[in-house]
Image: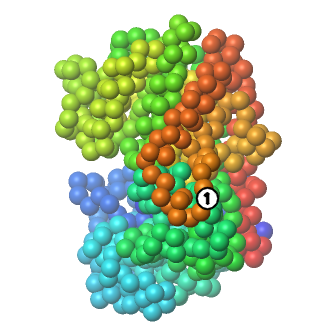
Amino acid sequence: MRPLTTVHVTHEACEKIGGIGAVLEGMITSPVYAASVGRTILIGPLFNHFGVPGPQRLGSEGEVLYSSLDDIDEIGLAARMRPIEWAFNVAIIYGRRRFTDPGSGRAGEAEVVLIDVFRINRERVDQFKLRLWEAFGLDSTRYEGDWGFEEYVRLAEPAFHAAMAILRPEELPAVLLSHEFMGLPTVFKAVLDGHRAFRSVFHAHECSTARHLVERHPGHDLAFYNTLHAARAEGLDVEQVFGDLSYHFRHALVRRAHVCDAIMAVGTLVAEEIHFLDHHFDHHQIDLVHNGIPAWSITLDERLRSRALLQGWAQQAVGFTPDLLLTHVTRPVVSKAIWRDFLVCDRLESRLAADGRRALLVVLTSAGGTRRPQDARQMAEEYGWPRAHREGYPDLVGPEIDLAREIERFNAHHHAVQAVLVNQFGWSGPLVGDAGTVMDFADLRRGADAEFGMAAYEPFGISPLEPLASGAVCVVSSVCGCRWFVESAAGGAAPENVVIADFTRWDGPRDLDTLRAIGRPERDAVEAAVAETVAARLHQVLPRTDEDRQRLLELGQSIVPRLGWDAVLKEHLLPTLRRLVGE
């Protein structure tokens, strides 16, 4: 079999920002991927226009080989790129980026193409938008005022031509992957003009429409998923149930993804959500391709060393040394349902108090990016950050404000369980106000006794399972895509170290009108009952001794190889790509 060539359109082409970046990292650093894929090309828009020296435009792990912005052409690429740049009035940067998995030390490499579309030829863009309307019924004029839509429509044609310029005939057909909605305009261009050169894939890391509805409905996941299942049983699609959603540009793009040659969904529910979008998906095969989970090896001594570092930081930051370290690494958005952490911790309070134990919940999240080490140090010295907070940057901004208030209220009425908001992106001594302690994000993962992830919408959930290999107990909601993956790997049921919180359990009437009308009171009642169940289970399985930690570590280490990227690639992703290119 010839090596595959993959072209990925993503906003994380030169920097790991979130989940898609983690997927690319896990994929590209896998030896299974390297053995089957000859070339990997990442394409995205150029975000940083100012203050970045030309050789650094692809980040600290990148090497710029061509940049018309900086008069760099190390490999004679101008003859192929300049005509595209002149035709569309764009600038192109090309180079290589090295990927490293910090947990395993694995490494890989990909080519990167960034395109500056800010001054693009508007007549060409308008002509492309007309073609999108004529072929797919996509009315771009409704969304072009939103840069999240406009930027990726502008990217589509120059991205297509740049890929064609660097691909060799023997590498075709290449697989063109749209990671989420961002790459769909480029896929639409390939469907219209490049059907012989590309096989197109929509890689659904989520269903944007489902997230939109879950976050905005007062019943959140309780209302949405019960409504979805009832509506699907009656043969209805999402707009027949929830009304016109064409105002939402992500919905408008994703509901047209049925034109792709294949759709890959990261979770069982994501596949069902996409089927729910439009009847065009009724007979479309959706391949289930889970994300991989970090499968690093760790010893008990390493775990205890990280745990001691975190306990030392906790003593300095919050004034006590916790017996149990609970963590939640997340984004501060409604879909993550962080309030459920405090419901569970409230029910843990009396149980831990009776044991004579104390726990600290560390919520690591940021709405303000990475705070500078000097700012973290100053806030810590001036008023005791992160235990204490003040509104305004470099401290609390946006949704961090309400979260800090919720934690303050919680701490005022609890002793055995306390919580601290670390509003920071990343984890190290200098970043969390303790410049004298040498620790990193891996220590946070290795030292945690439990990780919370009881989201209302979570298409997969890499983060909630990351500490599994280190012996942590992972608490995830029943709608998390990773739930089915773990259950399958464990033989059909969740293992002891994974606690499933089912916030969609509904015992009331199941007609559509009732389900759509589920609101805050009904959700509060369900959440209270589930929190009690989860707290009781968590109290049973949380470690009390180092012997318990050793046992949980061995259990985690026995499961994660079946959840790692090597297994996902070998059993799911690569067979799907091979099928597309006819092998």
User: In this orientation, does residue 63 appear?
Assistant: no
Instruction: Describe the colour scheme in one phrase.
Output: rainbow
For residue 147, side relative to residue 341 (left or right):
left
* Residue at the front extreme of this rendering: 509
Q: Vertically, is 513 above or below 371? A: below
* Residue at the right extreme of this rendering: 491
Residue 253, x across and y down, in percent: 46, 74
* Residue at the bottom extreme of this rendering: 134
Residue at image x 39%, y 38%? 365
Quarter of the image for residue 252 reads bottom left
Residue at image x 45%, y 52%? 519
Please rate how many residues cluster around mark 1, counting C-alpha atoms within 10 Å: few if below 14, some from 14 to 19, many from 20.
Answer: some
SS for callout 1: loop
Residue at image x 21%, y 24%? 378
Q: Vertically, is 432 above or below 489? A: above
Q: Quadrant of the C terminus?
A: bottom right
User: In this orientation, does residue 415 appear?
Assistant: yes
For residue 556, side relative to residue 61 (left or right):
right
Name the residue that disc number 1 marks: 510
Quarter of the image for residue 53 reads bottom left
Quarter of the image for residue 152 reads bottom left
Q: Vertically, is 257 above or below 437? A: below
Residue 260, x across and y down, in percent: 59, 77
Kindly identify the amino acid type of the residue bearing the numbered disc 1.
Arg
Q: Nearer the viewer, residue 103 or 237?
A: 237
Residue at image x 43%, y 75%? 244
Q: Nearer the viewer, residue 421 or 307?
A: 421
Q: Vertically, is 304 above or below 65? A: above
Q: Quadrant of the N terminus?
A: bottom right
For residue 220, side relative to residue 282 (left or right):
left
Q: Nearer the viewer, residue 573 or 345?
A: 345
